[in-house]
Image (cartoon, helix red, strand yellow):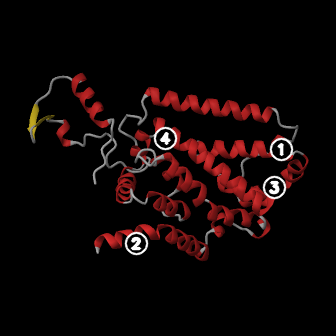
Amino acid sequence: MKVKSSWSAPYSSNVLMMAAPRNLINDGGRLRDEEGAKFEDSPTSKKPVGAKLEGRFPLTKWEFAAALGVFLIFSTGLFCIYLTMPAADYGKMKLPRTISDLRMLKDHLASYAKNYPAQFILGYCSTYIFMQTFMIPGTIFMSLLAGALFGVVRGIVLVVFNATAGASSCYFLSKLIGRPLVIWLWPDKLKFFQSEIAKRRDKLLNYMLFLRITPTLPNLFINLASPIVDIPFHIFFLATLIGLIPASYITVRAGLALGDLKSVKDLYDFKTLSVLFLIGSISIFPTLLKRKRTYE
């Protein structure tokens, strides 16, 4: 199934009108530029992940300005929240990149979270949502920190709430300016995703639950690509809210024993992945059953 970008046709026509006169050829009843006929209409076709668009950035000036504006608004809000926080040694507060960094941060924040629970939770949630919205790596450490500081039940509630809120913000941000960026970064993966969504429109919630529960596709890609392939927000929201619970439980529970955890990779061993795929298979079973009945 070939995915066509909604902006590729206007882009091609604008370039044709602005360019100098060239020889046109008849191709299936339509005129095409002889030189342009050698290439795909879309400037993003068959580009590897992270490849440059031969001098063209995937976002227009207006799209880049909109993204920068949203980022500045979120950043300003986050900064204002930190200004209201009680005094602390912020020199020791940095986003952890390793388990050892996380242990030191947990030891430093334990008394702070106990003395100022409401302010700490506000700062924690704001930071988590900000990172999730703008795809900043490190939310896995934030989830572990929730387990280490708040226990399993409160930790799961915090992680699921923040992950869902951040994913929803990312969804709308991608709906605003994400289409050219996603097509530029993951053209083949996006085609596959759209074809799978088209096959499962009747049971879309089940399929989205399967994707959220299992590591079949990265959550980052799901957040960005969902509005582009026309997944309704209510389906996206419910699948995220429910589907992230199993993985959140695993991560939060691991946060209770940070001393025994050597690496983030230890969180998802073969046994854990098997359990996640089993739960995911249960969620997608109605879709498979309906397809079997259709073939019969």
- Residue shown at the point (22%, 27%) measured from the top left: 16
Q: CA distance from mark 1 to mark 3?
A: 17 Å
- Please, what secondary structure does the residue beneath circle 2 have? helix
Query: In the image, which is nearer the foreground, mark 4 or mark 1?
Result: 1
The numbered mark, 2 or 3, whose residue comes first in the sequence reads 3
Residue corresponding to mark 4: 174
Query: Label 4 is placed on what type of residue?
Result: Ser
Residue 133 image point, x, y percent:
59, 43
Q: Which residue is mark 1?
A: 118
Q: Amino acid at mark 2?
A: Leu
48 relative to 70 in the view: left or right: left
Q: Quadrant of residue 73?
A: top right
Task: Estimate the spatial distance between the alpha carbons at disc 2 and disc 1, rounded to whole Å.
Answer: 47 Å
Amino acid type for the residue under numbered disc 3: Lys
The quarter of the displayed image where residue 28 is located: top left
Circle 2/circle 3 CB separation < 8 Å: no
Query: Would residue 26 be seen by someone viewing this image from the given angle?
Result: yes
Name the secondary structure under disc 1. Answer: helix
Spot occupied by residue 82 in the image (x, y as percentages of width and height): 78, 35
Q: Is residue 136 visible?
A: no
The residue carrying mark 2 is: 289
Q: Earlier in the sequence, mark 2 or mark 1?
A: 1
Question: Which quadrant does the N terminus fall into?
Answer: bottom left
Of mark 4 and mark 3, the one earlier in the sequence is 3
SS under mark 3: helix
Left or right: where does residue 176 sit relative to residue 105? left
The Cα–Cα distance between marks 4 and 2, rounded to whole angstroms, is 33 Å
* Residue visible at 91% across and 47% down in the picture: 115
Instruction: Report the residue that reaches farthest toward the bottom.
Output: 271
Residue at left 30%, top 44%?
4
Checking the image for residue 106, the label placed there is 3
